[in-house]
Amino acid sequence: MKRHHGSIAILMLGILLLLLGALAVLDVGRVMAEKRRLQKVADLGALAAAEALTDGPVNAAQNSALSNGFDPAGAGLLLTVEPGDWQTDGQFTVVGTFDSANAVRVTARHAPFPTFFLPDDATIVAHAIARSGSHATFSLGTGLLNAGGTNTLLSGLLGKPVNLTAASYNGLLNASVPLQALMVGLNAGTVEQLLDSQVSYDRLRLALIQALQAQGDAANVAVLQALTSTVPGNTIRVGNNDGTGILDLALVDAAAAVATRVSAGELLLAGLQMANRAHAAELGTLVNLPLVAKVAVNATVVNPPVVASGVPGLNRAGQWQTMDRGSNTTLGLSISTLLPLLKITVPVDVNVAPSEAWLQSIDCTGDSMTVTVGVRTAAACLTSGNCARGSGTLVFTVDPGHPLPQTKTLGAKQNVSSLLGGVPLLGPVLGALGAPLDAALDPVLGALGIRLGYADVTLRGAECRGASALVG
């Protein structure tokens, strides 16, 4: 009988242990389920707050939480919303106000969370960081191309005569293509692969043709088909990550990147300049004043221009996250005097320091946005000196009455001829040479996207905070 009672006790102990184990497993399952619920609350709350970053982000996060069954006023429940600065290296730093933030961190907490068997009630916490989706696409350039100057420049860069109309060039500048189409043309499966692509000028040209054909843009396809090159060129790096590419992309998520539209003409001209980098394109004799002087010119692209699209503000290193650069070019002038008693040839190298632009801020109110772009102007100087550039800001207002694209300008005109006063032996011809030289060089520089003394910024696209993305 004692033996029978002992067997029952052992059996009951086993059953008790099984029950306790089942309760423990149940507790663990409940904790994991609550963790998943809180993560969903934090994720959706962060997205809602990022979309309303300057228009009640805390209320937006709380309303999102309520709609997902989490009442921040409930017992043991807490929802915190912190403004912060998020950088592309993944770091989030809390800042003082939402007005100075570009991201939010939402924390959902449930403590204590009651358990059946675990020795202590659990504290369950979930975090989520969402980045505001505000971004803009902009470029530096003259806005409109002169046929004579552009044909002269492209003939030198392409190694063959080019004779297109101003309407053809400017139509190409105004034709935009989405990066998704460029990815298809360059066989890039992701945005990262696109930015890492290294292609020839003709490969880039054919990819742009394919993108324009997909849009039914026959006129601009015909222009691109005429712009073949006979000059062996350097490889073109698409992404400007190392400072040597033609596309600077600093966007929050892949969806925003692939939908970004860029100017086909600007991308092509930037690629052509990169392909000819360090190669002197002979532009021929641009000025010929009988019995006075003649000037032959070549242009060497040091760094090509960049098309930029990305988010506003500084990174942790104090550098602007989205920055655009014009063409950095050296002009080689061979000035030959034709005076009866003074026949000499003087070489003069002129460094053209590029204009620069950076995306400072995007502020949104209702259906209106204000995009602020900081700029430095283009300037020329003799290669032995430093180019003095002006700086300032350009403010774009985008609303139903002021659609995109928009072009704004800062600066005052500078002439190359103003630099020649200090060049020995040119004094006798400078007065007669100055105006014709500037008149000949201005359209050529314009084809490079340069107006000396100016920064011309074209805002081609802008998106307010409506498209946020989880980043942590």
Image (cartoon, rainbow, N blue to C red):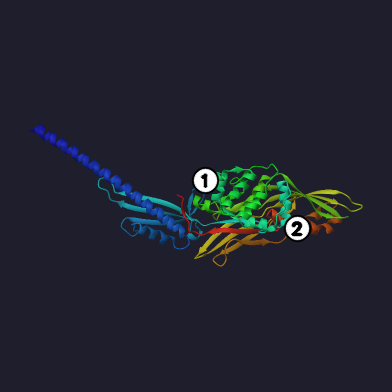
Please state which amino acid type lies under the numbered disc 1. Answer: Thr
Compared to residue 363, the image places residue 260 above or below, namely above
Residue 29 position within the rendered picture, expressed as x and y whole percent measured from the top left: 30, 46
> Seen from this angle, which residue lies furthest bottom?
401
Residue 53 image label: none
Residue at image x 52%, y 53%?
259
Q: Quadrant of the N terminus?
A: top left
Residue 339 position within the rendered picture, expressed as x and y whole percent measured from the top left: 89, 53
**SS under mark 2:** loop
Please state which amino acid type lies under the numbered disc 2. Answer: Asn
Q: Nearer the viewer, residue 422 or 158?
A: 158
How many neighbours does mark 1 have within 10 angstroms: few (below 14), some (14-19), or many (20 or more)?
some
Residue at image x 57%, y 43%?
196
**SS under mark 1:** loop
Residue position for label 1: 190
Residue at image x 84%, y 48%?
345
Residue 39 position within the rendered picture, expressed as x and y whole percent measured from the top left: 38, 51
> Seen from this angle, which residue lies furthest left?
1
**Separation (CA) of disc 2 from disc 1:** 44 Å
Q: Is residue 450 visible?
A: yes
Of callouts 2 and 1, the N-terminal one: 1
Residue 415 image label: 2
> Seen from this angle, which residue lies furthest right?
341
